[in-house]
């Protein structure tokens, strides 16, 4: 198949990376917003992350089975429709003023994202010559980094509206307080309505778009395949573990960024949100661009080892330093973790053949680390009464990524 036939499909697939990156990076804005709007505890507010990342655990294997039977295009369309449905559900959630409905809407969005990521990551990797698969996936993931830059700054200005202070709310009568909080909660309706409409338009485009179905190794009669067989590939098992810890570390860095910045650097939440976007988010984007370029000269697994080791050192700085030194250390972590997800993914599905779709599902399933690891960091932070000490947890995560890049990625024939 000619390169021209791959171009438009690759552009459309790349657009998906931006979309799910954008909605993911609205979550750190939703957490303080919903916490205030519903007078939640920190633990209750953290259910935003839990409802999102648990969906990856629940839906990853069904997504793999779906694409195994119907192909990547069908998976992408279904994922987009669920994404749009969840976005539209923010409107009745805001109208009914029920936090549980917001969590349901987020869960449905995440179910759609799970299917999209299960499809788009291997599709981008396989849509071209095998020798450039890691480069291609990192390039597509660069747009995920662009979304990480834009979403916090845009979201802070649209969703984190200037409302009543906690003291002013406490002084109000119960009916007046309910009206005030309802007004603040309603600020999510327009952004998610617009997002849902955009997603629907893209779904329609995919319906009429001719996507080349990637041909994988045909199964021979009596030949074993499936989840258990896929896990016999040692490099896939390593990738599942590495991705679990990496995603956990990434969610820790971004979700706790505003809390960390306000404590370590002593800045306001609004300024911290700007640093989250134009600092950590932009560093993440630039890191993707730089890392993707470096892969033309440095093997992906070696670059992964170097970046993971640097992040271990930066975590030590984030724990021990104060002020803007600590803040910029965390921004540096965002830069050097930028290539990790797509690199782990592409190395993990390398040479899987007929097991590629199940392998993809298992790696996407490991994104549940984003639901498991952050509460561990929160627990450590609470025990030490210091959010900086919580960075011991991402440090350990990056050590696991380091060993995957060092030896775990090596393909052993089965």
Image: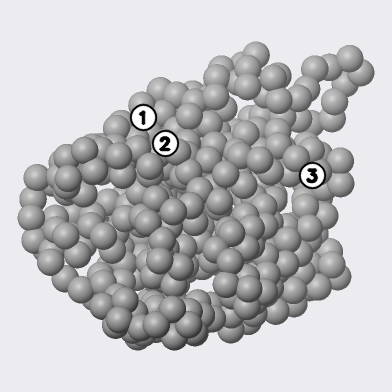
- Confirm whether residue 395 shows in the render: yes
The chosen color scheme is one colour
Instruction: Give 165 or 221, whichever is nearer the viewer.
Output: 165
Q: Position of residue 8 (x, y in %)?
A: 71, 68
Where on the picture, by quarter, is residue 167? bottom left
| Residue on which disc 1 sits | 400
- Confirm whether residue 12 shows in the render: no
> Sequence order check: which comes first, mark 2 or mark 1?
2
108 w.r.t. 65: above or below:
below
Picture residue at 48% right of the left edge, 43% below the top: 371
291 w.r.t. 28: above or below:
above
Label number found at residue 245: 2
Instruction: Give 169 or 11, whichever is nearer the viewer.
Output: 169
Instruction: Give 297 or 87, whichever is nearer the viewer.
Output: 87
Picture residue at 81% right of the left edge, 73% below the top: 204
Q: Position of residue 120 (x, y in %)?
A: 66, 53
Quarter of the image for the C terminus: give it: top right
């Amino acid at each position: 198949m000619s390169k021209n036939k791959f171009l438009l499909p690759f552009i459309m697939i790349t657009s998906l990376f931006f979309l799910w990156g954008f909605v993911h990076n609205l979550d750190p804005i939703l957490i303080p917003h919903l916490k205030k709007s519903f007078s939640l505890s920190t633990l209750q507010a953290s259910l935003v992350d839990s409802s999102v990342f648990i969906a990856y655990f629940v839906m990853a294997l069904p997504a793999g089975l779906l694409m195994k039977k119907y192909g990547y295009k069908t998976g992408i369309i279904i994922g987009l429709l669920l994404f749009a449905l969840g976005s539209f559900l923010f409107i009745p959630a805001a109208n009914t003023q029920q936090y549980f409905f917001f969590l349901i809407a987020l869960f449905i969005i995440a179910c759609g994202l799970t299917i999209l990521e299960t499809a788009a990551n291997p599709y981008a990797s396989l849509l071209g010559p095998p020798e450039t698969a890691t480069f291609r996936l990192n390039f597509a993931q660069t747009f995920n980094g662009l979304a990480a830059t834009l979403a916090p700054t845009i979201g802070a200005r649209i969703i984190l509206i200037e409302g009543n202070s906690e003291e002013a709310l406490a002084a109000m009568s119960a009916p007046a307080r309910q009206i005030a909080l309802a007004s603040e909660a309603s600020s999510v309706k327009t952004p998610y309505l617009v997002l849902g409409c955009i997603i629907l338009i893209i779904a329609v485009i995919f319906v009429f778009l001719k996507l080349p179905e990637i041909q994988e190794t045909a199964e021979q009669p009596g030949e074993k395949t499936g989840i258990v067989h896929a896990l016999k590939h040692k490099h896939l098992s390593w990738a599942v573990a590495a991705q679990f810890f990496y995603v956990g570390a990434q969610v820790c860095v971004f979700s706790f960024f505003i809390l960390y910045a306000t404590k370590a650097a002593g800045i306001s939440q609004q300024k911290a949100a700007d640093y989250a976007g134009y600092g950590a988010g932009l560093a993440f984007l630039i890191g993707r661009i730089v890392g993707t370029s470096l892969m033309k000269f440095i093997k992906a697994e070696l670059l992964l080892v170097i970046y993971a080791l640097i992040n271990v050192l930066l975590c030590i700085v984030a724990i021990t330093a104060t002020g803007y030194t600590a803040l910029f250390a965390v921004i540096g972590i965002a830069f050097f973790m930028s290539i990790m997800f797509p690199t782990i993914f592409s190395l993990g599905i390398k040479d899987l053949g007929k097991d590629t779709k199940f392998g993809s599902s298992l790696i996407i399933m490991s994104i549940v680390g984003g639901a498991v690891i952050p509460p561990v960091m929160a627990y450590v932070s609470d025990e030490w009464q210091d959010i900086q000490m919580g960075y011991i947890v991402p440090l350990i995560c990056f050590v696991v990524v380091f060993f995957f890049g060092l030896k775990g990625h090596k393909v052993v024939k089965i």
